[in-house]
Image (spheres, grey):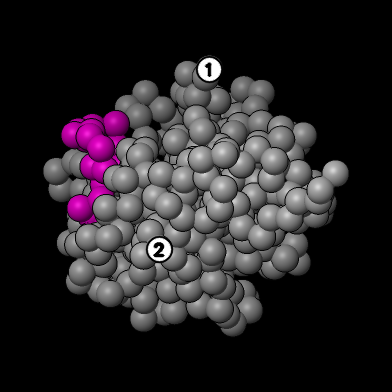
Amino acid sequence: MTARLFEPLALDDLTLENRILIAPMCQYSARDGAATDWHMMHLGQLAMSGAGLLTLEATAISPEARITDWDLGLYDDATERALGRVLGAIREYAPIPVCIQIAHAGRKASSEAPWIGGQQIPPESPQGWRTEAPSAIPHGEAEMPPHALDAQDLKRVRDGFVATARRAMRLGIEAVELHGAHGYLLHQFLSPLSNSRTDAYGGSLQNRMRFPLEVFEAVRAVVPSGKPVWMRVSATDWVEEGWTLDETVELARCLKARGAPAIHVSTGGLSTRQAITLGPGYQVPHAERIKAETGLTTIAVGLITEAAQAEAILAEGRADAISLARAMLYDPRWPWHAAAELGARIRAPKQYWRSQPRAFKDLFRDTQFGQR
């Protein structure tokens, strides 16, 4: 029997060769939002991994939507050209489909890179700017309150998501993930901890979901039929009176009704008060419940590091796909090694066919070797 991890997965008209998804991982290595040679090296090695899907890091819809001044963006011709250069190189050598995670950092923008400390940069400082959010509630107590978005701002932001999606389609990107997790703008609308609005976008669950769902609908409308669009969510804030798993289940139902073929389930990131109990696969129960109650194709992530662990999650029906981030950075050939362990076959670049171990003569698909 084929390992569940290496069975195809259909997302609308896009069929992935296996159920290993490379999660979006911020690199803080862009220049003025434009992809650099770092992205060429970083994404190039991940594209050769044999995974079913490669997701670009959080890609900002505008300069002020970036987490840091070094974040990747797709909001003007220069950023489109730079990303197109990287994608062109990947496509020449690796047939992996590419997903873009479209993002707005909201009140968590204007920050230092994490290896410098990640603290907020004041708007008057170089590489800093005034942040914006649903409400004028700062992420950290010592931070400057963000600008509270008004009706005109909401239209501007929504249009920004659409414009970035259009650019992504011009680049031939095969799938779109909206970033509604980890305390960034769409998550900020969802959580009562960051959304104290008294208009149609705050208060009740339906109101708090309104803007993220409007963004989803607007992006879905400009992405060609058959190309999948879904959302990454934080299933809980891990804070009392914050966003909950019950509410996430309802959001998943609403996304499914609007055409989302999947949901990518993470947690946390909104509040400095979060209290997370870490352990192997600690977020999988959230994905499991969403899958069980909505029937939506569910992508699990979070301290999934071993092939047998990933296979068990899928075989037990707890999720439909596995998303890997840090495990892929540590081992960019993780899918090769998982296939070898689980007795599956995987695609590898022809330039690397001769690396196939003697113990796994059928590991790489479609290999050919001459006699000389």
Q: Say which of 350 and 227 sits in front.
A: 350
Q: Which mark is residue 116?
A: 1
Vertical relation: 370 (above or below) 206: above
Crowd class of label 1 (few under 14; some 14 to 19; many from 20; radius 10 Å): few
Residue 236 locus on image (x, y percent): 24, 49
Residue 240 image-quadrant placement: top left
- Residue at 56% across, 73% down: 14
- Tell me the amino acid under the disc marked 2: Thr
Vertical relation: 254 (above or below) 153: below
- Residue at 36% across, 81% down: 257
Residue 241 locus on image (x, y percent): 15, 48
Residue 138 in view of the camera: yes
- Residue at 62% across, 22% down: 125
Vertical relation: 327 (above or below) 361: above
User: The N terminus lies in which quarter of the figure?
Assistant: bottom left
User: Which secondary structure, mark 2?
Assistant: loop
Q: What residue occupies the far left of the structure in this picture?
A: 240
Q: Earlier in the sequence, mark 2 or mark 1?
A: 2
What range is drawn magenta here? Answer: 268-288
Predominant SS along the magenta part: loop
User: Which secondary structure, mark 1?
Assistant: helix
Crowd class of label 2 (few under 14; some 14 to 19; many from 20; radius 10 Å): few
How far apart, in angstroms, are the residues tagged by discs 2 and 1?
A: 45 Å
Q: Say which of 201 and 370 sits in front.
A: 370
Q: Which residue is mark 2?
A: 2
- Residue at 27% across, 54% down: 313
Residue 201 locus on image (x, y percent): 35, 64
